[in-house]
Structure formats: C-alpha cells, structure tokens
Image (tube, helix red, strand yellow):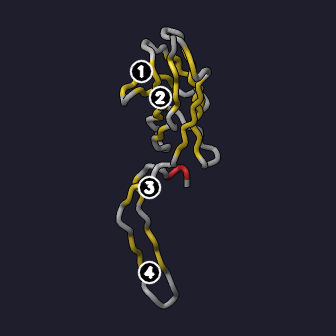
Amino acid sequence: TAADAGRLLAVRVTMTRTGYDPGSAVSTTRQVAKLPSTTAASLSRTSVQPRRAVQVAVTVTTATRGVTPGGTVGLMLNGRQVALSRLKAARTTLRYVPRAVGTLRLTVRYVGQDPVAASTSRPLVLRVRR
C-alpha cells in the first residue's frame, strides 16, 4: 500500500490446521520502493532579455490516489541549482533572472519526500536575447 512505500517490511505467516502443530514463517526484511513521481514544468515566456525575470510553474504528481507530494524543488542550469522553492499542494512557482545572452536548458528537480521518490522534469529551453 501507499503507507508502506519507502519503509522496511517483513511478512510473518502463521498456519494452523486441525491435527497438526501450528507453524509460522518470517520473510527477510526488504525495503518497499517509494512511489514514483512526475515533475512537470512550464516557462512563463520562452524568450526574454537579460536581467528580465521568467517564472517557471511546477507541478509534481504521483499515480497513487490520496498521496500529495511535498518537499522542495530546485531549478537547475547545467547541473547547478539556480532557484529553490517549497511545494504547496504539489505546486509552486520558481523565479529565475538570466544574466547573459544565449540559449539555456533548464530542468526542475524534485528531491522527493517520503513516501514519494525524486524526479526531474523534461528540459525547458529559454532563449535570452538582447
């Protein structure tokens, strides 16, 4: 179940039958996988001038009903975090101000929070032009 995701779990089975001694067996302890997540992001504009802010709308979802992802998301540029925000009801908006002219590939990384696993958005292309 969703409540077990990310936790250690062992199973004990007890058997009884008339005419026989009761028996039981215990499985080895295993970690249950976290619930997979999907991070979706979109830019408020795909082309901006240097030093003009762009907003990135972010939504993190899971396929499991009743589980709302929480925690933080980071806006990443070339593997470096350039903005950070906390999710509220699985949504947030990040703000980024590009400094130089060029084409940037941004991604949003959700760090995950029990019982939900981390995920990364598809790349977003931002053109910075004079």
Whole-percent x and y of residue 7? 43, 50
Task: Check disc 4 and give the amino acid type.
Answer: Pro
- The mark nearer the N terminus, 2 or 4, is 4
Q: Residue furthest bottom?
A: 19
From the viewer's side, name the closer residue of 65 and 4. Answer: 65
- The residue carrying mark 1 is 82
Judge by depth and name the residue closer to the eye, 105 or 63: 105
Instruction: Find out whether the residues at labels 2 and 1 contact each other: C-beta distance under 8 Å.
Output: yes
- Residue count near mark 3 (Cα–Cα under 10 Å), binned few <14, some 14–19, many ≥20: some
Q: Which numbered disc, 3 or 4, marks the residue closer to the eye?
A: 3
Disc 1 residue type?
Val
Residue occupied by mark 4:
22
Q: Which residue is mark 3?
A: 32
The disc at residue 102 is none
| In this rendering, the label closer to the viewer, 1 or 4 | 1
Question: Tag 4 or tag 3, which sits nearer the N-term?
Answer: 4
CA gap between label 2 and label 4 equals 61 Å
Q: Quadrant of residue 76?
A: top left
Identify which residue, 11 or 67, lies in the foreground. Answer: 67
> Does the residue at mark 1 contact the one at mark 4 (Cβ under 8 Å)?
no
SS for callout 3 = loop
Q: Secondary structure at mark 4?
A: loop
Callout 3 touching callout 1 (CB < 8 Å): no
- How far apart marks 3 and 4 lie (CA) works out to 29 Å
Q: Residue at x 42, y 85 (%)?
A: 21
Residue that protrudes farthest toward the front in the picture: 130
28 is higher (above) or lower (below) than 48 = below
Q: Are dots 2 and 4 in contact, CB under 8 Å? A: no
Question: Which residue in the protein does label 2 denote?
Answer: 106
User: How far separated are the C-alphas under marks 2 and 1?
Assistant: 10 Å
